[in-house]
Image (cartoon, rainbow, N blue to C red):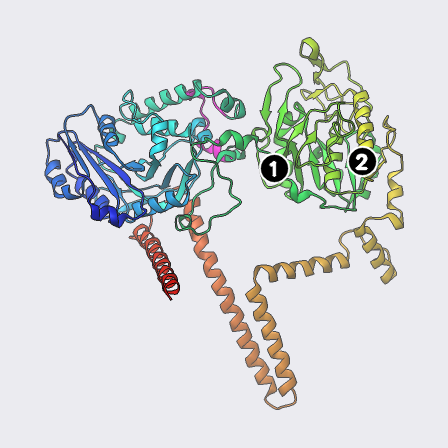
């Protein structure tokens, strides 16, 4: 038996622009809790609901309870079904809403959920499905657990981090439901929601929302407990099916991370610790975004219906902030040749240095660190990825540059997204790389615009030269660029066909071509260096740099590179050619009649202190104004009352007043910090959170009151506008 009731004209009129939201509740013998479920939906007081209840011919008191709410139910279906999924399919087939979701007959919708869902989907047309903060309650309806706010992605889901997307808090657009098949798969008896999520992930990203929407009830005898083993078996079957049928582009983009089968899933801890998985995480949606607040323009979005993870792996970084950053300055581009062992590297302390590849093997010999780093080799980068990542983590001010993709030059010539090898972070930048050619010299061998493209080099030093030119350096000094290579007999040559011998693997720690014998030591992978091609590329780079007036000198000790004029490294550190930092230290030493000590000078220290004060003023302008006002007040008192007997007491009272004002300002700022910190602590607790009595409902009521106040403000603004127009 099915009963359909169209929405009344009054309801439609009151709905205004509200989206129609369809909620399906399947039930079979659920009399114990269905009253709370129905009440939680009806009490939403949402003006444009489509509430569908599907009862599988219950034998208990379910129907009598359902009849109490019949006036609020759009469609009631009472007939035998083939189980939970079949009942849901019947309900969704009858649904007329633009937004869909379901609430089982023992769970509840939390207050204000539908209004929030409506606002969010209208404010963010790019979002196709959402899930709120997970929570659970006991049989008495007391909320006893709040789960952590976390990001979801298809990559995480298929790799093993897939438990659990809470169904009671998950809602989606009808358009997504249709593209994902438009029904639950009856092959699965319990993991129907898991199967639906994997199909949704093919078409759109899931946005986690910092809002409580639904609540799961933990009770005795529920399906998720009784059939837990069957649920796990069905999950494995679903994952195997999805992994075996993955689109080639998706599999290729994330081949470094994706398992081959459900038996080889990664642990949740392993995924959480690997930063590469974060590449596909969409930004968490904050409640204000549903009200039109706090929407950041720099958050990338994609059109509705586009599954986004692949482009995130392939998108290059925006390098425009580096454009002309060092205009008119000088820098040092450092190769890793054995001549570094004969170079006074201490001279580079305080200079801007570009370094590359396994430079970290040098760190135990030097007190300074390079400012910029590059690695482009398709064998070196994967081989040294862990060490490169650790180096950039330990030196957060060092900026690393990598091609967006790397491609093997031997074997299967596989092309891989570099972000799957070196995890993205604030100091890791990925650029477009184009093959070099002789078609349009010198520009087909050298790029001035690294944000557009960097030409693929025969040596990474050419990449560093292109980056340096983009940053505006007018003088570049090469060191350690020996360009003189020997391939030892102990090295294994790999590959076949025209690429035979290009890929090399060392069998001993006997590398003669770099500053450390371990550089390409035992089991390290590298390419045949082909120094003649390197020198030819240097010649084209020189022509390109000469054309824009950039001077390049070779300060390498020995070696084969004669393309650039040679000078000794020491010659760049004569008194009139020292770096700005070195010159300032020398002037200070002359002023006090002694040699400046090692370490930062007083001038540099003073500049640093001024910079710190400026940063405080920028971040806390009110605090700065209060301090300034207090100082002005004290000076004024000194001028007016300096010679009077009670002046000391007046100064003391003014000082205490100023101190009290400062403490009050700081306390107000700390209050906001503590509120935000408490929320973050809740997130960090891995879900092991027991909220205070009524805390969840209290927060929801606060958010709803904010929403009501905003609506009232908008109404008053509209009335004022009408009054102005009428006058």
Asked whether, in this view, residue 461 is left or right of residue 564, the answer is: left
- Decide which of 212, 652 is in the foreground and name it: 212
Distance of mark 1 from mark 2, alpha carbons? Answer: 24 Å
Between disc 1 and disc 2, the foreground one is 2
Quadrant where the image shows the N terminus:
top left
Q: Which residues are magenta?
A: 258-273
Residue farthest to the bottom? Answer: 645
* Residue 534 seen: yes
Mark 1 is surrounded, within 10 Å at the Cα level, by few (under 14), some (14 to 19) or many (20 or more) other residues, namely some
Q: Which residue is mark 1?
A: 317
Mark 2, secondary structure of its residue: helix
Q: Which residue is mark 2?
A: 545
Residue 271 sits inside the magenta stretch: yes
Residue drawn at 28 percent across, 46 percent down: 110
Q: Is 74 placed above or below 589 here? A: above
Query: Do the residues under discs 1 and 2 have CB atoms within 8 angstroms?
Result: no
Whole-percent x, y for residue 406 in the image: 63, 25
Residue drawn at 57 percent across, 84 percent down: 650
Q: Is 283 placed above or below 274 here? A: below
Residue 311 sits inside the magenta stretch: no
């Amino acid at each position: 038996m099915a009963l359909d009731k169209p929405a009344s004209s009054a309801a439609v009129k009151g709905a205004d622009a509200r989206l129609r939201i369809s909620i399906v509740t399947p039930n079979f013998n659920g009399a114990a809790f269905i009253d709370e479920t129905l009440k939680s939906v009806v009490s939403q007081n949402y003006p444009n609901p489509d509430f569908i209840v599907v009862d599988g011919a219950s034998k208990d008191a379910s129907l009598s309870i359902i009849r109490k709410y019949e006036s609020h139910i759009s469609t009631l279906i009472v007939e035998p079904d083939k189980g939970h999924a079949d009942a849901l399919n019947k309900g969704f087939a009858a649904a007329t809403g633009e937004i869909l979701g379901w609430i089982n007959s023992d769970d509840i919708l939390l207050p204000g959920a539908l209004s929030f869902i409506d606002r969010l989907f209208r404010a963010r047309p790019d979002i196709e499905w959402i899930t709120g903060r997970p929570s659970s309650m006991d049989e008495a309806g007391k909320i006893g657990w709040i789960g952590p706010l976390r990001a979801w992605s298809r990559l995480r889901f298929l790799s093993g981090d897939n438990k659990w997307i809470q169904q009671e808090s998950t809602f989606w657009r009808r358009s997504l439901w249709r593209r994902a098949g438009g029904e639950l798969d009856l092959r699965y008896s319990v993991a129907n929601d898991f199967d639906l999520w994997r199909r949704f992930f093919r078409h759109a990203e899931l946005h986690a929302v910092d809002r409580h929407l639904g609540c799961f009830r933990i009770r005795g005898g529920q399906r998720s407990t009784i059939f837990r083993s069957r649920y796990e078996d069905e999950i494995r079957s679903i994952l195997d099916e999805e992994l075996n049928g993955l689109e080639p582009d998706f599999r290729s983009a994330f081949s470094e991370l994706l398992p081959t089968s459900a038996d080889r899933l990664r642990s949740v801890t392993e995924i959480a610790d690997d930063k590469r998985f974060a590449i596909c995480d969409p930004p968490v949606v904050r409640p204000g975004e549903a009200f039109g607040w706090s929407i950041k323009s720099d958050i990338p979005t994609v059109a509705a219906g586009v599954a986004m993870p692949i482009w995130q792996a392939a998108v290059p970084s925006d390098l425009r902030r580096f454009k002309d950053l060092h205009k008119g300055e000088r820098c040092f581009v450092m190769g890793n040749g054995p001549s570094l062992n004969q170079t006074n590297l201490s001279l580079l302390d305080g200079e801007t240095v570009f370094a590359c590849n396994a430079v970290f093997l040098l760190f135990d010999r030097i007190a300074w660190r390079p400012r910029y780093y590059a690695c482009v080799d398709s064998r070196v980068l994967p081989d040294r990825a862990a060490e490169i990542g650790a180096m950039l983590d330990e030196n957060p001010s060092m900026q690393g540059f990598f091609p967006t993709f790397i491609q093997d030059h031997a074997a299967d010539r596989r092309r891989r997204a570099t972000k799957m090898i070196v995890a993205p972070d604030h100091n890791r930048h990925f650029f477009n790389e184009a093959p070099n050619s002789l078609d349009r010299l010198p520009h087909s061998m050298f790029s001035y615009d690294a944000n557009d493209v960097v030409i693929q080099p025969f040596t990474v030093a050419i990449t560093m030269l292109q980056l340096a030119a983009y940053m505006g350096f007018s003088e570049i000094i090469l060191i350690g660029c020996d360009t003189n290579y020997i391939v030892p007999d102990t090295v294994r040559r790999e590959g076949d066909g025209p690429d035979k011998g290009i890929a090399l693997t060392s069998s001993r720690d006997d590398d003669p071509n770099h500053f450390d014998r371990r550089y390409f030591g035992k089991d390290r992978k590298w390419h045949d260096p082909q120094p003649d091609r390197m020198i030819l590329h240097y010649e084209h780079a020189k022509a390109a740099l000469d054309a824009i007036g950039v001077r390049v000198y070779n300060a390498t000790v020995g070696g084969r590179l004669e393309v650039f004029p040679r000078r000794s490294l020491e010659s760049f550190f004569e008194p009139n050619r020292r770096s700005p930092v070195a010159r300032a230290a020398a002037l200070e030493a002359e002023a006090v009649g002694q040699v400046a000590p090692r370490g930062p000078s007083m001038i540099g220290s003073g500049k640093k202190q001024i910079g710190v004060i400026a940063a405080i003023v920028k971040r806390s302008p009110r605090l700065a104004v209060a301090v300034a006002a207090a100082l002005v007040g004290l000076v004024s008192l000194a001028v007016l009352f300096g010679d009077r007997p009670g002046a000391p007491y007046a100064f003391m009272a003014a000082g205490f007043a100023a101190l009290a004002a400062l403490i009050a300002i700081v306390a107000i700022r700390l209050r906001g910090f503590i509120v935000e910190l408490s929320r973050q602590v809740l997130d960090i607790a891995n879900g092991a959170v027991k909220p205070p009595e009524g805390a969840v409902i209290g927060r929801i009521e606060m958010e709803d009151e904010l929403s009501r106040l905003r609506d009232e403000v908008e109404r008053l603004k509209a009335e004022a506008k009408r009054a102005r127009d009428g006058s």
